[in-house]
Image: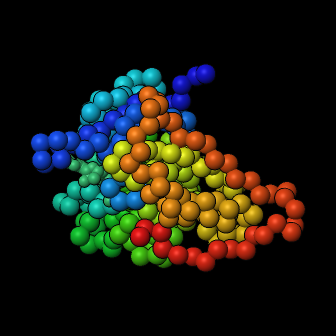
Amino acid sequence: MSKPFLSIERLTQTYPDGQGGSTTVFENASFGIEKGEFVCILGHSGCGKSTIMNILAGLAEPTSGVVKMDGLEVSGPSLDRGVVFQNYSLLPWLSALKNVTFGVKARHPDWSREKVEAHARDFLAKVGLEGDVVHRKPSQLSGGMRQRVSIARAFANHPKLLLLDEPFGALDALTRGTIQEELLKIWSGTEQTVFMITHDIDEAILLADRILLMTNGPFARVAESVEITIPRPRKRTEIVEHPNYYAIRNHLVQFLGHRSKELAGKQSDDADQRPETVRLEKTGQAEDEPSAPPPLRAVND
Ligand SMILES: Nc1ncnc2c1ncn2[C@@H]1O[C@H](COP(=O)(O)OP(=O)(O)OP(=O)(O)O)[C@@H](O)[C@H]1O
């Protein structure tokens, strides 16, 4: 079997527990991501999502295990891996436009100034930022606009892998919805590989090809890989009508509400802990199958 584009192999992370011992966040976590896939990871606070992302970004080293991208081991940050954090991380002294051209110049040192600027403006326009607003500094932009700049900046650099750490966490629901759809549009035009942390089940269903589910730590596991069997293009208002939507949503709610705790803290003898694939398919089933939507409830309890 050929190796996936991104291969996470037996990743283990332990930290000192402050009392002379150590805590194992996760152990021998292994999974793959194919080129062009959009993968979200869901799990309760503290299970180790950000730790995995920092390792994928090359910003942190695991205690053991390796990450390979295109067959090469990841070590240290690289322009091939772009990161978008919740807090935007824009350079405050530069305009929105210059925040984008900065990375494009580094990526394409041979491009003319005009070409760099046109490229940056093109990506800003894709997220709805056009005209004079591109000359504003981050402090003169709203939170939603800043996050749009971060996304434009990340995509404009064409990294092979885009890592998004709760990029919409600080936004109000309306802005969040609009930017989610802008993100989908920009992603579908580029076929970039995306790995995203979110706490929002509906966001994950809207955006992802697959959702990785993590159990609670310590000894957290990436226990399941749930395929999102809803065709693209997807719209927030339309996916809820799809027969698979509530089956998938229920499964995720159940996992986060119960199974993430039941499976927590259990060490396994398997040297290689790979997630189980879950594929829920309700299309073509008998009409009398109960399909009433469950009551919506918070899942991050
Ligand atoms: N540098 C560190 N030293 C000690 N423990 C750490 C360190 N960094 C993270 N941890 C611990 O590792 C565990 C995983 O942290 P991580 O930030 O990866 O979780 P997370 O799933 O991203 O959480 P959240 O959803 O709240 O962001 C936590 O228990 C955290 O306290």
Horizontal side, residue 268 vs residue 25: left or right:
right
**Residue 11 placement (x, y as % from top left):** 37, 34
Using the rendered view, name the quadrant where residue 197 is placed: bottom left
Going 36% across and 25% down the picture, which residue do you hit?
73
User: Looking at the image, can residue 289 be seen?
Assistant: yes
Quarter occupied by the N terminus: top right
Going 82% across and 66% down the picture, which residue do you hit?
289
For residue 59, above or below residue 243: above
Going 29% across and 35% down the picture, which residue do you hit?
62
Query: 133 and 141: which one is in front?
Result: 141
Using the rendered view, name the quadrant where residue 150 is placed: bottom left
For residue 297, above or below residue 147: below
User: Looking at the image, can residue 130 be seen?
Assistant: no
Query: 157 and 207: which one is in front?
Result: 207
Horizontal side, residue 204 vs residue 103: left or right:
right
Q: By what rule are the colours in the image chosen?
A: rainbow
Quarter occupied by the C terminus: bottom left
**Residue 27 placement (x, y as % from top left):** 37, 37
**Residue 171 placement (x, y as % from top left):** 39, 71
Going 25% across and 65% down the picture, which residue do you hit?
137
